[in-house]
């Protein structure tokens, strides 16, 4: 069968999921004929995405994105809505590009990795292609999902995002930390889409803490912790514009530009992991048996839910800031869930292929 991917370019998780599914499909005799990825001026698409999909045509389009505060930390909901509404004309052009690529590549199945234009495309451009949506966010459609405490608007906006991105979907696949969520009439619960590179790593402990921040404004908190505790080695990954590939602050603090292979190696070597509360890297940490502290991006309710869900699955703790002291105090009490998580991850290919090849 022929597949076309539409991938949200915000953060790292949806892109690595697309890479993993790309490899699963190719290994089983299928073809990914086109990948369309959302971009914005705020965040560039990391080189590893193009490197991993080098045998497939990739088209980048302008897609809706978040607006952050002046410190590049908190999400500004109102400004995000206004900014994206102002770009309606740009997004219309992006939808036309999607339509052109669908017509020229003639896929059997369109797979949407939580891109809003992917859902709008299905709504505005009816076609015969099957439409499958894959994301961790779709667990919020499950009756047993534990929503984080928040305003009614926060919860409603997450549900609205799920509706838009999965409009008229033939199948919805919700990625989950564990098997605790059973399939329902609406969704198939699936293991995470971890790549082979993760599963081939050998876990060790070289005594440093790994940090990943989706917004570089959180670096101020890291600097403060380092000032107070210079004896604790830290390796941090960010995507700060114009920063060097590697910036060695001193003997125990280093910042790295986002690099797929380097990040995975550091993940396998760290003693613990602190991160904004995306889904994919938390899964990588669980697979490699690394205790985690999850820090939801301020005012990004989806990440608050991720942090709560990850905590309940045994990944680690959640925090409102990058206070590494909390993570260090937690380490003696951490109970590994790696074995159960690895067993769950072994089912990824069979579950994905069953849903993606049978309609």
Image (cartoon, rainbow, N blue to C red):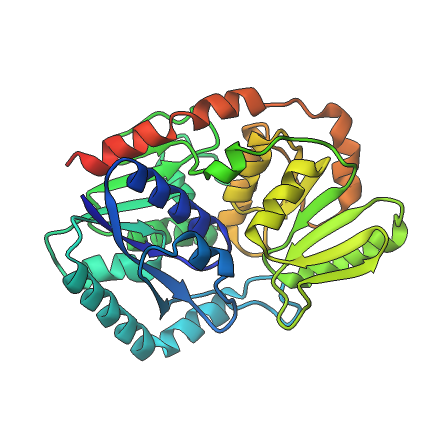
Q: Reply above or below: 19 against 340.
A: below
Q: Reply above or below: 17 against 342.
A: below
Q: Is residue 271 left or right of residue 144?
A: right
Q: Is residue 111 left or right of residue 304?
A: left
Q: Can residue 276 be seen in this snapshot? A: no
Which residue sits at x=24%, y=30%? Answer: 354
Of 7 and 298, nearer the camera is 7
Q: Reply above or below: 335 against 186.
A: above
Q: Can residue 315 be seen in this snapshot? A: yes
Which residue sits at x=40%, y=27%? Answer: 181
Q: Quadrant of residue 170?
A: top left
Q: Is residue 81 left or right of residue 150?
A: left
Q: Quadrant of residue 104?
A: bottom left
Q: Position of residue 42 (x, y in %)?
A: 52, 70
Which residue sits at x=79%, y=33%? Answer: 329
Q: How many numbered marks appear? A: 0
Q: Which residue is outermost to the front? A: 55
Which residue sits at x=40%, y=57%? Answer: 8
Q: Position of residue 320 (x, y in %)?
A: 67, 48
Q: Position of residue 205 (x, y in %)?
A: 73, 32
Q: Position of residue 64 (x, y in %)?
A: 40, 66
Q: Quadrant of the N terminus?
A: top left
Q: Reply above or below: 91 against 13.
A: below
Q: Quadrant of the C terminus?
A: top left
């Amino acid at each position: 069968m022929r597949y076309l991917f539409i991938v949200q370019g915000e953060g790292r998780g949806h892109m690595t999921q697309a890479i993993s599914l790309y490899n699963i499909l190719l290994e089983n005799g299928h073809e990914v004929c086109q990948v369309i990825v959302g971009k914005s001026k705020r965040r560039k698409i990391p080189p590893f995405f193009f490197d991993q999909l080098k045998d497939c045509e990739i088209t980048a389009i302008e897609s809706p994105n978040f607006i952050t505060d002046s410190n590049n930390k908190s999400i500004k909901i109102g400004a995000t809505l206004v900014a994206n509404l102002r770009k309606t004309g740009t997004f219309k052009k992006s939808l036309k590009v999607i339509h052109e690529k669908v017509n020229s590549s003639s896929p059997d199945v369109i797979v949407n990795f939580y891109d809003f234009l992917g859902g709008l495309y299905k709504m505005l451009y009816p076609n015969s292609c099957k439409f499958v949506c894959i994301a961790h966010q779709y667990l919020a459609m499950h009756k047993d999902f534990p929503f984080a405490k928040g305003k009614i608007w926060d919860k409603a906006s997450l549900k609205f995002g799920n509706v838009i991105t999965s409009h008229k979907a033939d199948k919805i696949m919700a990625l989950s930390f564990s098997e605790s969520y059973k399939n329902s009439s609406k969704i198939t619960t699936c293991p995470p889409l971890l790549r082979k590179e993760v599963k081939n790593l050998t876990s060790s402990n070289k005594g440093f803490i790994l940090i990943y921040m989706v917004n570089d404004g959180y670096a101020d908190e890291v600097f403060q912790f380092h000032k107070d505790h210079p004896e604790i080695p830290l390796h941090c990954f960010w995507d700060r514009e114009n920063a060097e590939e590697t910036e060695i602050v001193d003997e125990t603090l280093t910042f790295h530009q986002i690099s797929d292979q380097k990040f995975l190696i550091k993940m396998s070597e760290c003693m613990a992991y602190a991160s904004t509360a995306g889904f994919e890297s938390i899964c990588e940490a669980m697979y490699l048996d690394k205790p985690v502290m999850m820090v939801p991006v301020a005012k990004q309710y989806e990440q608050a839910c991720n942090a709560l869900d990850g905590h309940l699955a045994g990944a680690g703790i959640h925090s409102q800031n990058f206070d590494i002291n909390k993570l260090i105090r937690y380490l003696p009490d951490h109970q590994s869930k790696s074995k159960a998580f690895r067993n769950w991850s072994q089912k990824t290919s069979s579950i994905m292929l069953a849903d993606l090849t049978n309609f």
